[in-house]
Amino acid sequence: MATLTSAGVGSGLNVESIVSQLVAAERQPADARLSALESTTKAQISAFGSITSAMSSLGTALDKLKGDGSLPGRKASVAADAGFSASASSKAALGSYSITVEALAAAQKLQSAAVASSTQVGNGTLTFQVGADAAFDVVIQAGKGTLADIRDAINSQASGKGVTATIVHGDSGDVLTLTSDKTGSAGVLSISASGGDGGLSVLGTSGGTLTQVVAARDAVVTVDGITRTASSNRLTDVIDGVTLDLAKAKPGEAFSLSVGADPSSLKTTLQGFITAYNAALGTMRTQSAAGGEGATAGALSGDATPRAIMASMRNTISNSYADFAALGLKTGVDGSLSLDGAKFDTAIAANPNAVKNLFGDDADFGKNMRGLLQNYIGDAGLLASRSKSLTEQMKSVTEQRSALDARMERVGAAYRARFTALDSMMAQLQGTSSYIAQQLGKTTSG
């Protein structure tokens, strides 16, 4: 009798279909359980991620109120057409100043003699020094000594080192212009030539043919009659906390600069904290919503963590309620914060340190809220711990799926072996039945 090589051939049974259905039926309960666990875990990981992000944003907003960030800003006011502009940080003292721009800082500019564009000026090495900075070399190759070649070599080899070369095409020929990138005496150019054919000596600042078009010049200002000289037209250290940007020299003409309080920037920073605080509460409410009656339940419905965080945050606010109220900060029924702008302005006018006394590095509320956030969003905080636990749970689900796949492979193989044996036995029975029928037929015909 021939050996069966394909299940179902002998019996007519669709063994593979039967095995697939049996394996699917056995797999379904475990598969459904793992799918539900996977879906829930993914949603919870996402929910805790949203909460962590919102809490981190709150921490960032709170950190902006550290140090000088918790003090009113300063506004610098300058008389019209004064020849300078000014800005002030919170470190600037309130007051007024009389300022005169006697001279602006200028960058030195040198020009070569005019030559034809094809003229080979020379080759060798040009050594540059800008002010007191370290000297540097620019190598001019033989046959690459036109003014255009020299310009390109300088701009390529000396890029970012303090000198810029350009060409002006005049009636008498090309002129190489060398400009210091630094204004004032700190940017004076010193150039010497060495090696090569000696032709580059014409570009030396000593003994060459370079002419000075613009001299290096320092800025000069007087502040309340006190003279200050600087290499730059931006002065950041003449008046503490004040930056002066010089635009036009007006020798002998004094203009006023006044520095006044500007609480608007502080109010904006505080409003940023309020917005971040309310957003954090809103995120936790959404993720922990109970659902029901048409409302969608949050991924963390029934989880005590979001409620515990919200309670801690609200308690921290409540412990400083009097200071919050005095500053114009109000809490709603749902715990959200809002700011009475007019009351805030009045409070800051009366006490410029009011915000610092509440949110500053050493203030009770500031320290408590920063500590609370660290406990939740720090590397070893509660939210990081919960997220890590859920990530491990997802890993476990993946491992369980792999184990389920392997087990179902074995179950399928076992079913297939049984049905293959059944198929073989039925084929044998059918063969025996046919043989008996044939013999009975012979007997009857005889």
Image: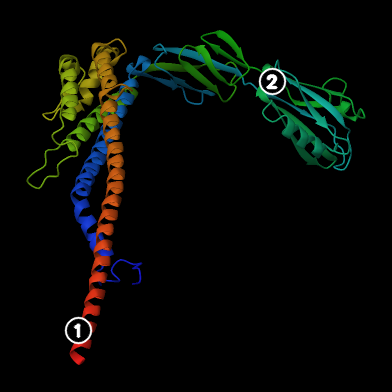
Query: Which amino acid, mark 2?
Result: Gly
Tell me the distance, in whole angstroms, between the alpha carbons under discs 1 and 2: 123 Å
Q: Is residue 418 above or below residue 294?
A: below
Residue at left 28%, top 71%? 10
Residue lying at the far bottom of the rendered structure:
445
Residue lying at the far left of the rendered structure:
293
Residue picked out by circle 2: 187
In terms of image quadrants, where is residue 356? top left
- Residue 131: x and y, percent? 71, 17
- Residue 103: x and y, percent? 62, 19
Q: Nearer the viewer, residue 226 or 165?
A: 165
Question: Is there any visible trace of residue 336 in the rendered image?
Answer: no
Residue at left 67%, top 17%? 186
| Quarter of the image that includes the N terminus | bottom left
The circle on residue 440 is: 1
Residue lying at the far front of the rendered structure:
446
141 with respect to 313 (left or right): right
44 with respect to 219 (left or right): left
Q: Nearer the viewer, mark 1 or mark 2?
A: 1
Labels 1 and 2: the sequence-earlier one: 2
Q: Nearer the viewer, residue 209 or 260?
A: 209
Q: Is residue 382 above or below residue 22?
A: above
In terms of image quadrants, where is residue 24? bottom left
| Quarter of the image that includes the C terminus | bottom left
Query: Which amino acid, mark 1?
Result: Leu
Tag 2 secondary structure: helix
Q: Is residue 266 above or below residue 147?
A: above
Question: Is there any visible trace of residue 170 in the rendered image?
Answer: yes
375 with respect to 184 (left or right): left
Tag 1 secondary structure: helix
- Residue 70: x and y, percent? 32, 17
- CB atoms of marks 1 and 2 within 8 Å: no
